[in-house]
Amino acid sequence: MNRAVAGIALAFAGLFLLNASTASAQDALEKIRQRGSLVWGADQEGGGPFIYPAADDPTRLEGFEVEIAEYLAGKLGVKSQFQQGQWDKLPDLMDRGDIDIVLNGYEWTPNRATRYGTSIPYYIYELQLLARKDDESLRAWDDLANPSDGELKRVSVLGGSAAQSYLESRYPDQVAIANFDGAADAMRAVELQLDGIDANLQDLPVWTFYQNGFPDLVPIGLPVGRGYYVILTRSNETALLQQLNRAIIDGMLDGSLRRIYEKYRMWNLTQSERGLDVDGKGNFSGDRIARAAGESGPDEQDFQAVRGWSVVMQRGGLLVWAAGLTIVLAVISMPLAILIGLVLALCRMFGNGLLKFLASLYIEVVRGTPLVLQLYVIFFLLPEIGISIHAFWAAVIGLAVNYSAYEAEIYRAGIQAIPRGQMEAATALGMSRGLTLRRIVIPQATRLVIPPMTNDFIALFKDTAVCSVITVVELSKQYYIHARSTGAILELGIVTALLYMAMSYPLSLVASHLEKRLARERRK
Amino acid sequence: MIRLENICKKYGDTPVLRGVSMSVARGEVCVLLGPSGGGKSTLLRAINGLETFDSGSIRVDSIELGPTPGPARDAALFAIRRRVGMVFQQFNLFPHRTVLENVIEAPVHVLKQKPDEARAVAKELLDRVGILDKIDVRPASLSGGQQQRVAIARALAMKPEVILFDEPTSALDPRMTNEVTGVMSDLARSGQTMIVVTHAMSFARNVAHQVHILHAGTIAESGPPEQIFESPQNQITKDFLNEAVVA
């Protein structure tokens, strides 16, 4: 009986969720047409050849997926509009309704196919094993499986990528896997032999795009682990999906896609073997045939590492802009946090039983959970119950909620530090509890809490970095994007660090000034 | 005008007040003396509700204050605090406000007087306690005696019918003690009703109309100062006075 009830409840819950997702998803194609733009989600931090800031004008985006998105939007008769999102959160952004499609090197998996609409592949990728040129102990896949010195080889991969699952399924216990956040970082780790890393299993198009930047690396063996990059839509978006498929096939048939891939050096035998590619006139052309004809390809995009002063001059401005966003985030959320914190402290200290309990619960829950989780809940889960918040305000709320718990405890300590006699004197003068708090206790407590709160303000400046998980591109996210796309990790890193210091140092000065003034006031 | 009847109070299992009864007439200066721990401060603070009590009753004018918590007691306390001012051992001035602001705080925010009027009254009072030249400084830059005189002005600004003094000179050196007892004597002469807990014997002897010796939670002896100081009847009173003189 109980099981039946639970079953029914589950079914209802499922129905509700299903309804929620289909309700927000219906007629995406129509919405796109009405809006006049196809909003596509990707993460610039992924870098070349997918999507990255252009070398000559970093405010412009480049990459084969940028061009495919423009191509697809053109086919739908609308403009393409890019939306930044953290790579692994892109499907969540789509569920929220912030983007129409995910177009960012997402491979087809049975799991994804059940949760989302998946287009036909727009690219067939393979994995390439890379090792150091001078490493004689690693010249073939066999060397990986059976190392000559008997010691496990360490292979860097992009965490959570196809390369990782390929190694785990094919070479369990035969290789040691090192997870990296960025493709370029994983290659650099091999070159620099960081942490004893011997090889990198890399997406082939990434390698062909970046190979100029890694002259000490060499491909080992043939590409392996074929997989399919597909476009994700929300489920049940048949009309949109069909249009996308149509556009991809058209692009194969009229050579548009091939031109894009050649530009980014991604065209290869595997793509031709689909047998769908044709030349501009509609004639089938395999690569071998094309090569035999001595046809020279169009201009190719190259990865060029940009280093030194020029990169600072070129991209520094963008970092300064991002720092501006960081400041705005911090300056709006901190006063909110202090205000909420004060209310919480008062509830906890002077409220009735229920308020006391609720305030304590709030403080413990918020302090006991990470900021990134709170941001995630506010941004991705609230829409499930019908509350959708813009990313910027979600970030402000997340930071304010998180810090309010700490400010509440600071305020509590501040209020407790006010001598009992202050409250007694006010009470004896006939002041009510509320008046006493407002006029006597809180003003004095506020003076006491300013130094620790300034300290928290500085911490909050740096915590804004976490907001990149909900698509807010603040200073550190902007740094990662440009450091990865240019390779100027050090130069831009210094600029970014200086910007953070430039923001927090004045605060330290203000804090110490206030502290001195407070001390003077008490002496007088 | 104030009558305490059979006030009892325990801290846990320790009784601090064991059935104290006394009354203070309008214009009277009543001094509570006795060894530390005798319950003087507790009794005083019970009158305006800074301390609770377990049984008995307190009457201020026609306001009846009982021991049972609740809206009735809150309402009584609200009315009593409008009539009863208090001066503390540690002065308890508001450190974030100037001297003048300390004095007008309650008149403006509790009695809703206009700030200008309150300021004029406050200046008069500060003049009366001899602090007029310091009205715009913060309390921390005043001496203890000056702070206590400001605290008296602050209490007076509410035009209280009674002022409770809780060891007003115990944190002061002898010279400052004289400053403060001087102001208190002037007040007494002007007919202000006062209940004073103190160790300042000369004030008790010269200014008080009534003296009560509190010991171990009960009144050991009551009477006018001449009687208490010249011919004490009770052994406790004699011991206490002897020790006080020696000290």
Image: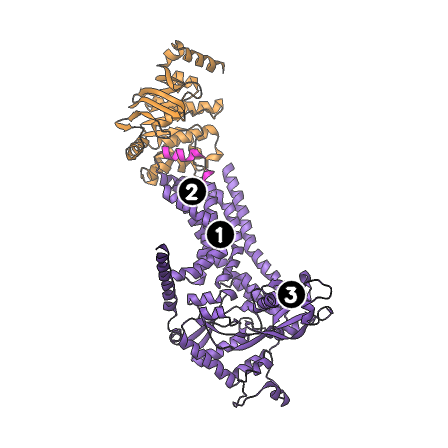
Chain colours: A purple, B orange
Q: Position of residue A317 (x, y in %)?
A: 56, 66
Quick check: A318 left or right of A440? right
Circle 2 chain: A
Residue A369: assigned label? 1
Q: Position of residue B133 (x, y in %)?
A: 44, 33
In the image, A5 versus A243, the foreground residue is: A5
Q: Residue under circle 2? A: A442
Judged from the image, the secondary structure of the residue bearing numbered disc 3 is strand
Total labels drawn: 3
* Part of the protein shown in magenta: A415-429
Q: Position of residue B243 (x, y in %)?
A: 47, 14
Q: What residue lies at 41% left-to-right and 20% top-to-bottom?
A: B38
Q: Which mark is residue A269?
A: none
**In the displayed structure, would residue A59 be above or below residue A441?**
below
1 or 3: mark nearer the eye: 3
Tell me the mark number nearer the camera, choosing from 1 and 2: 1
**Chain hosting mark 3:** A
Density class for disc 3 (Cα within 10 Å; few <14, some 14-19, many ≥20) is: many
| CA separation in Å, label 2 and label 3 | 58 Å
Residue at 43% in and 58% down: A378
Task: Determine the secondary structure under disc 2.
Answer: helix
Q: Which mark is residue A155?
A: 3
Q: Secondary structure at mark 1?
A: loop
- Of mark 1 and mark 3, the one earlier in the sequence is 3
